[in-house]
Amino acid sequence: MPKVSEAHREERRSQITAGARRAFAAHGYHGATVEVLEREIGLSRGAIFSYFPTKLDLFVALAQEDQGRLLALWLEHGYEAVVRHVVEDDPEWLGVYLDASRMLRTDPGLRERWRTLNPDAQERLEARFRELQEAGLIRTDLPMETTGRFLGVVFDGLAVQQAARFGAPIDADGTIELLRSALAPK
Amino acid sequence: MPKVSEAHREERRSQITAGARRAFAAHGYHGATVEVLEREIGLSRGAIFSYFPTKLDLFVALAQEDQGRLLALWLEHGYEAVVRHVVEDDPEWLGVYLDASRMLRTDPGLRERWRTLNPDAQERLEARFRELQEAGLIRTDLPMETTGRFLGVVFDGLAVQQAARFGAPIDADGTIELLRSALAPK
């Protein structure tokens, strides 16, 4: 009965990624040791590593899930929805991403994998960007790399402030209004 | 001769902060052990800790130096100068700040010290902001907390991307142009 077995594998995989997410959020990437992962996931290292050969593979799988979700949100509901999502996201989990920025700088293998997490993401975002430019909603006097990068900078900055939980809550509506003004055609 | 002794103390203090900056940049906050700090600074732990009682005190002193420098830059040359500075800053050192965001969330003592690093900074920035609003250079239709926070978000986001060194270099001029549009009076 291969179908049951497939469903079982899928369920196991979800159990592993959900537990790993909790473990990384609570202890950071480096603090989530194999013992911590076993405890939080409720499976032995043998079982876990038959799905994900290394801890890094497990982390990359979680990043891929997240990126895919944010991409879908952006394509379906616009960057405004991404701002709202980041402002409401779990600060502990966002902190794991900030840990990862050091790893990204120093690990060429991870950089390469990061680039190809969602291979068609860049292309789909650029197509959407061009549509918005043609509809007169986004300025065309700056290169798309600059305007697109600016959105990425703002998302990362929101993640830092949310991860630090420092100061008052972020005003999502006001932030979206500022972004609209930044991107509006001149 | 207290004057010589004062100069000597000041020189020692600079030797310690410069070495600590290199140690934190290369190993991260947690990776910069007492042994690493001794080696990089070139002084014994006894000598170091007579100036800074704990590793956290040493880190807070560095953060205070940085904040003071950025504040002066902002007040004298505007937020545009801060953007240029962050885009050109040492990615390794910026990574240390990202480490600190987890510490900020979980350590109430550090949060309190962070808030008072440069006690009059907030007040001086707000005064400058009001001047720019009165001169018709910054919008007044959003609360100052929202516009000021947005600048902080962009600086943090630039720091993340610079720390990760992922993708092409950031277009500082384009980023400044987008910020001007975001903040311009409507």
Image (spheres, coloured by chain):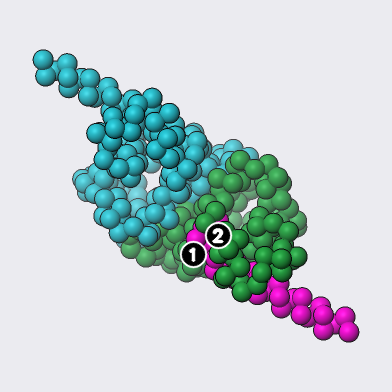
Chain colours: A cyan, B green
Residue of label 2:
B32
- Residue A124 in which image quadrant: top left
Residue with the mark numbered 1:
B26
Residue found farthest to the right: B1
Labels 2 and 1: the sequence-earlier one: 1
Residue A168 lies within the magenta run: no
Same-chain status of marks 2 and 1: yes
Task: State the residue in front, B78 or A20.
Answer: A20
- Left/right placement of residue A89 relative to residue B49 reads left
Q: Secondary structure at mark 1?
A: helix
At numbered mark 2, what does the secondary structure look like: helix, strand or loop?
loop
Amino acid type, mark 1: Ala
Task: From the top left corner, tell me how far across and down residue B56 is, in percent.
Answer: 66, 55
> Relative to B175, is B44 above or below?
below
Check the picture and name the quadrant holding the C terminus of chain A.
bottom left
What's the residue at 26%, 50% (across, down)? A113
Q: Nearer the viewer, residue B58 or A76?
A: B58
Residue at image coords 29%, 50% = A114
Question: Could you classify mark 1 by the number of other residues whose Cα lies within 10 Å: few (under 14), some (14-19), or many (20 or more)?
Answer: some
Tell me where residue B59 appears, x and y as whole percent. 63, 59
